[in-house]
Image (spheres, rainbow, N blue to C red):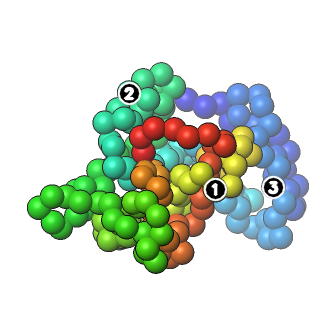
Amino acid sequence: MAFLRVVGWASSALCVAIHGEEVAMTLFPNPCLIHVHLSLFTFHFSPFSFHFSLFTMRIDILTACPELLESPLNHSIVQRAKDKGLAEIYVHNLRDFTLDKHRKIDDYAFGFGAGMVLQVEPIDRAISYLTSQRHYDEIIFTAPDGERFTQREANALSLKENIIILCGHYKGVDQRVRDHLITKEYTIGDFVLTGG
């Protein structure tokens, strides 16, 4: 159970601390009703009431190789977060969203560029299925030419409630996916990794 303390309160500002560490200082144009959404916690304030509750972050991962994610997502800090109900992580095999008997997910690039890419159709079906169940704050593609993933970006994502992560594979994805379905693209560095 988190120890929460309101450190400061004024007509236009609120400062909140959890376990003695200041986590938020927020300015409000209308102090009559305040909703603060921080990583793992939701606070509702008004001049007459206070409500505090934990929320669970949901992460849906779309991948061509779900087996590669079993170990890192089921041990250590990630497993402890899942056990405490702070995170729900679901891994979806892109092949489950194909319609052909061979469960094919790769094709030549739209526009006939070199190399194979992930097809747009299974990705679109997967994202459409997930977004029909709930609203997603971000749909992220892991791409070698994406924005560098930094601690600042990690902190920003920790404030989200529901996110989808599309893992890159082959030479990438059909460009239509990037143009129409993705809201953010991240890379962790200038090097090549296996899997996806």
- Mark drawn on residue 26: 3
Describe the element under mark 3 as helix, strand or loop. Answer: strand
Residue 132 position, x and y percent, is 34, 70
Q: Is residue 63 left or right of residue 140?
A: left
How many residues crowd around disc 3 within 10 Å: few (fewer than 14), some, or many (20 or more)? few
Disc nearest the viewer among 1 and 2: 1
Between the C-alphas of marks 1 and 2, the distance is 26 Å
- Residue at (84%, 60%) from the top-left corner? 27
Mark before the other along the chain sequence, 1 or 2 = 2
Q: Amino acid at mark 3?
A: Thr
Q: Is residue 189 above or below residue 14?
A: above
Residue that label 2 marks: 71
Is residue 100 visible to the viewer in this orientation of the structure? yes
Residue 142 position, x and y percent, is 54, 52
Asked if the residues shown at circle 3 and circle 1 are in contact, with their CB atoms under 8 angstroms apart, the answer is no
Describe the element under mark 2 as helix, strand or loop. Answer: helix
